[in-house]
Image: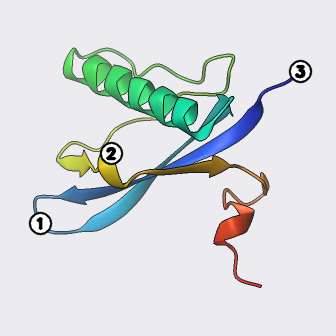
Amino acid sequence: MALAVYEVDVPTTNGNGRRGVHIFTGQADSPASALRHAQEVHAAAVAAQRSGLEVPRMQPDGWGARGTRPGWEPDWSAATAGRWSVPQSFVRVCDVEA
């Protein structure tokens, strides 16, 4: 059985008070597992960037990072995870107003 694709939305802020959302997607068996994958991918990307290495790209399970934004801090306690139901738009069905 194939795993579902999840989206993890992580609020971020920088030192100037600007806000944003970092989005991760990939295969997982639950929202908790998706959140764990997103945290691992983020940690690997930050470690690679700090070491002067290339940020790890997408893994076979779909998790990966394209880069990091220095000075932006993720708020993992406010992160949300849910099934990625509208793959064409990077927006979950539950986030779309009818």
**Disc number for residue 1:** 3
Q: Which residue is mark 1?
A: 16
Amino acid at the residue labelled 2: Trp
Q: Is residue 65 left or right of residue 15?
A: right
What's the CA distance linking mark 3 and mark 2? 29 Å
Q: Which residue is mark 2?
A: 76
Picture residue at 40% right of the left edge, 35% below the top: 67
Q: Nearer the viewer, residue 13 or 34?
A: 34
Q: Nearer the viewer, residue 74 or 79?
A: 79
**Can you name the residue that lies furthest to the bottom here?**
98
Residue 85 horizontal/vertical position (percent): 78, 54
Residue 88 horizontal/vertical position (percent): 79, 56
Whether residue 30 is visible, yes or no, is yes
What's the CA distance linking mark 1 and mark 3? 45 Å
Q: Residues within 10 Å of mark 3 (few under 14, many from 20)?
A: few
- For label 2, the SS is helix
Amino acid at the residue labelled 3: Met
Q: Nearer the viewer, residue 44 or 28?
A: 28
Picture residue at 10% right of the left edge, 59% below the top: 15
Q: Residues within 10 Å of mark 2 (few under 14, many from 20)?
A: some
